[in-house]
Image (cartoon, helix red, strand yellow):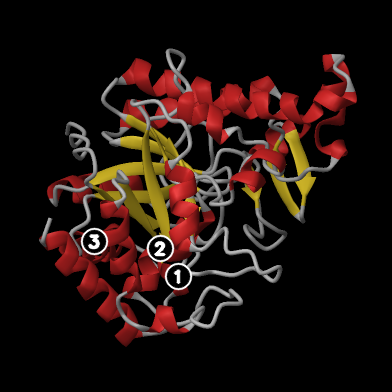
Amino acid sequence: MQPTPAPAAGQYRGIWISYLEWQTTDFSTESSFTAAVAQMLDNCAALGLNTVLAQVRPFGDALYPSKLYPFSHLCTGQQGVAPGYDPLEILVRECHARGLSLEAWLNPYRLQLNKNLPAQLADSNLAHTHPDWVVQAGGGLYLNPAIPEAAAYVTEGVREIMEHYAVDGIHFDDYFYPSTAPEIDAEQFAASGLPEAERNAWRRQNVTALVRQVYAAVKAHDPTLRFGISPQGNPDNNYSQQFSDVSAWLTAEGGQCVDYVCPQVYWGYHYTLKSGSQRFGFENIVPEWLAMPRSEAVALYFGLGAWRIGDGDGGRNEDSTTQWNTGGNLAEMVADLHAANADGYVLYRYDSLFRSAYPDLARQEADALTGLNAAE
C-alpha cells in the first residue's frame, strides 16, 4: 500500500497517540487490537483530522518486529516478547483505509523513563548491548547524543521502518539532550579538544547531525515522505537545555533538516507566569514562533494541549482554568491559527478527547473542532 499524499498546505490536522494510550489498549490478540485501533481511528476521522502520529518506539523498543529493537512491553507486558502479530502493520492499514496519514512517532534517545517505565529491559535493549552508548539522567536511561554510532543506529532504525511499512512520515518528539550536566558527554567533549565556552554549541551540533542524518535517510527512501519534529513550545528551553537548534532547522536550505516543526504550545490565552510575564500566553507565543525566519520548504504546525481540558494550564491568570472548561477553547485556538496563516495543528493527545476524565467537556471540545473542520 502506498503512502497517503501529504495534506495541502494549511490543512494539516493531526493527533498524537502516545504510549499512554497504548497502556490502556487491548493487545491480547490481533483481533482485539485491530478493533481497538479501528475505534480510535474512526474517532479521529470523524473529528475531521487527516494525520495520526502514533508512538511506535517510546523506550528503545518497537511496536513492530524489528531486528534492531526489542518488542515493546506495551504489547505483552514484557519487553522483548512478541504479541504474535504486527501492531504497526495494522495501524498503517487501518489509517489508510480511512484516508488518514500515519506518521511513525519515535523517541530517538530514550531507553527508560525511570526504573518503572519500563520496569524490565530486554537483553536486546541497547542499555545491555551497547552500555557504552548509554547515559543516566533524571532516573532514566538515554543514548548519548555525542556518540555518532548511537545516532547512526537511530537512523538505521528509521530506515527499517520505511523499508517495511508504508508510513507517511517519521516524527520525533522533544526528547533530545536529557540533561545539561557536564558529565553526560564529558569524555566525548574532552576528545573534541574544544574550549569549555563552546560546549553548548558542540552539543547543538550533535543533535543537528542526527536530525540531518534522519532527514537525508527519509528523502533517500522516498522524497514524498515527511520528517518533522515537535520541540518544546519554549524556544529558550530547546536551545539552552535540550541543545536543539530549532531556528537552524527552520531556516536550513540545501542541506535541509526537517519538513516541519510543531512546537508544543500547551498554554492557554493570557497564560501568566509567576513573574507576571505573559510571553507564553497563546496569543503571544504563537506570533513569536510565526515571526521566526523560516525556509519556504519548512511548515510550521502547533501542538495544542487537549490534556488541559477540565484541569487548566496552571497559569496565574484569572481564566487559567475557566477557559479550559468552556468546551470550545481548542476550536478557538484552531480558528486563530487559521487566521494567522499557520500551516496546521496537532492535538495532544487522543485520550484527552476520547477517554477523558471530563467526558462532557471533552465531547463539547470535540464537537466544536468537528464543526470547525467541516467548515473548511
Give the residue drawn at x 44%, y 60%: 283
Q: Nearer the viewer, mark 3 or mark 1?
A: 1
* Residue identifier under label 3: 44
Against 178, residue 306 (above or below) is below
* Residue identifier under label 2: 349
In the rendered image, residue 154, in percent from the top left (x then y), is placed at 55, 30
Give the residue drawn at x 26%, y 64%: 40
In screen coordinates, is 8 left or right of 184? left
- Give the tally of numbered discs: 3
Label at residue 217: none
Residue 1 can be seen in this image: yes
On the rendered image, what quadrant is the N terminus found in?
Answer: top left
Amino acid type at mark 2: Arg
Q: Are marks 3 and 1 in contact (CB under 8 Å)?
A: no
In screen coordinates, is 249 left or right of 148? left
Amino acid type at mark 1: Trp
Secondary structure found at label 1: helix
Front-most of 368 and 16?
368
* Residue identifier under label 1: 307
Front-most of 289 and 263?
289
Q: Are marks 1 and 2 in contact (CB under 8 Å)?
A: yes
- Give the Cα distance between marks 3 and 2: 11 Å
Q: Are marks 3 and 2 in contact (CB under 8 Å)?
A: no
The mark that comes first in sequence, 1 or 2, is: 1
The mark that comes first in sequence, 3 or 2, is: 3
Give residue 259's quadrant in the image.
top left
In the rendered image, residue 104, in percent from the top left (x then y), is placed at 38, 42
Residue 85 can be seen in this image: no
- Give the Cα distance between marks 1 and 2: 6 Å
